[in-house]
Image (tube, grey):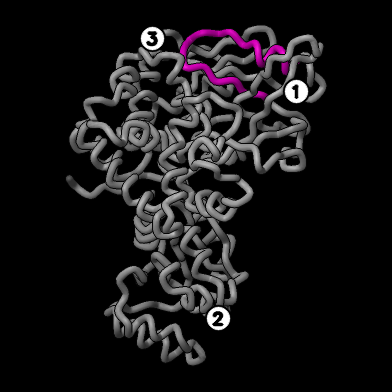
Amino acid sequence: MGYRIFKRKIYAKMLDWKQRSAGKTALLIEGARRIGKSTIAEEFAKNEYEGYLVIDFSNAGTEIIKLFNDVSDLQYFFLSLQAFTGKKLTAGKSVVIFDEVQFCPKARQAIKHLVRDGRYDYIETGSLISIKQNIKDILIPSEERRLSMYPLDFEEFLWAIDKEPTYDLIRYSFENLRQLGDAATREIMKLFRLYMLVGGMPQAVSEYVASSDLSAIDDVKRDILNLYIEDFRKIDEKGRAATIFRSIPAELARNTMRFRVGEVIENARLSRLEEIFANINDSRTVNFAYHASDPNVGFALHVKYDYFKMFLADTGLFITLAFMDREFADNEIYRKLLIDKLPADLGYVYENVVAQLLQTSGNSLYYTTFKSADGLSQRNYEIDFLISMKDKICPIEVKSSGYKSHKSLDEFQKKYSSRIARRYLLYTKDIRRENDIICLPVFMAGLL
């Protein structure tokens, strides 16, 4: 399979950093493993600088590691670095990339002095969970700008498969609330279901472009999941973090109102596993959605951090993880998504992809549960996601079909009408209005 480099949105943010920072800060790109941090950093260096040097600390030689023990003589430091790597740097026109910087904490500490020196620009890449574990005894540089990197979103996926004009149409329809038409909606939904199956991990997308073989793509995703699971075992030798991670599809399938740790690990209490959940969050492999007890602008002021749901950061990985213990041929989600026959009991797959696209587009994830406004019913209603719009909030309900019932949205309107800007229903059909509810095809989630 050929090595492919995909167009990514983070590139524009890196350009903005280069222009605004003008060498006054280093750039730290953080995110889950295997999402393309190293690739985008080197591609940016090739295109935007006259020269660059990459130090991959996962396999750097001892002579390079030792250089960071003492950076008091920067002239000696830079001459040695160029001699060891065989790369020549031009002051003011070159960038140094610290790849997998978590493996050399002193290199990260040196950023303060290197940036102050001003000769070169600096880009760091790393996994946040490993970075946090390896900074206990170092001074964290304030001269850093951080960017979070995610798997390819749906628009980036369309770029990768040469369908760029498709998203231009999607955006125009969304911005003007203009219908796409049934035929166009069906065709785009086919592409979106394909995106859900393949996911946004660059290796999986590359395999799809090369072979269109879903079995081979599944193998790629299994390799990535096994890598994540091994990482979790390293941070928790008892295997609890790995068990929690693997349980996410099953917990969502239970359709409960929060993640029940006691159902996953016998006799476990959340209060005793706070550090493990913090590490899972820092891994960026999982998106946490927190319960807003009093849904209003400033969700963080009313959030219950011990009451949450978890989604995988990549829906393609989610679908593979759900059937990790079985053969690819047994994965019913693949078959049913391909023929657009995903039953209601697998609707959590759509919730996962909506969580992914909302997170990637800059929204923090919140949801809420509540009783009816009149107090007569003891039924619990749930709003799948909440986002803010200026001084109001927007409740979002997700459907895995074209079914347009929206009881939860209606009850939410009765209870919190003064707080609501717009109500959204995400489903599998064309854009339409139903009174004040905007029904959007689910592939528009990333535009909210």
CA distance separating discs 1 and 3: 33 Å
Of all residues shown, which one is farthest toward the front?
267
Residue 269 located within the stretch drawn in magenta: no
Residue under label 2, please give it. 113
Residue under label 1, please give it. 420
Residue shown at 40% from the left, 77% from the top: 90
Residue 43 on image: x %, y %: 35, 57
Residue 424 appears left or right of 420: left
CA distance separating discs 3 and 2: 59 Å
Residue under label 3, please give it. 183
For the N terminus, the image quarter is: top left
Work out whether residue 258 or residue 93 is closer to the camera in this orientation and state it.
258
Residue shown at 30% from the left, 39% from the top: 205
Q: Quadrant of residue 371?
A: top right
Q: Amino acid at mark 2?
A: His
Q: Amino acid at mark 3?
A: Ala
Work out whether residue 213 or residue 80 is closer to the camera in this orientation and state it.
213
- What secondary structure is marked by label 3? helix
Point out the frontmost of discs 2 and 1: 1
Q: Which mark is residue 208?
A: none
Residue shown at 53% from the left, 67% from the top: 26
Residue 409 located within the stretch drawn in magenta: yes
CA distance separating discs 2 and 1: 49 Å
Q: How many marks?
A: 3
- The region drawn magenta spans 395-413
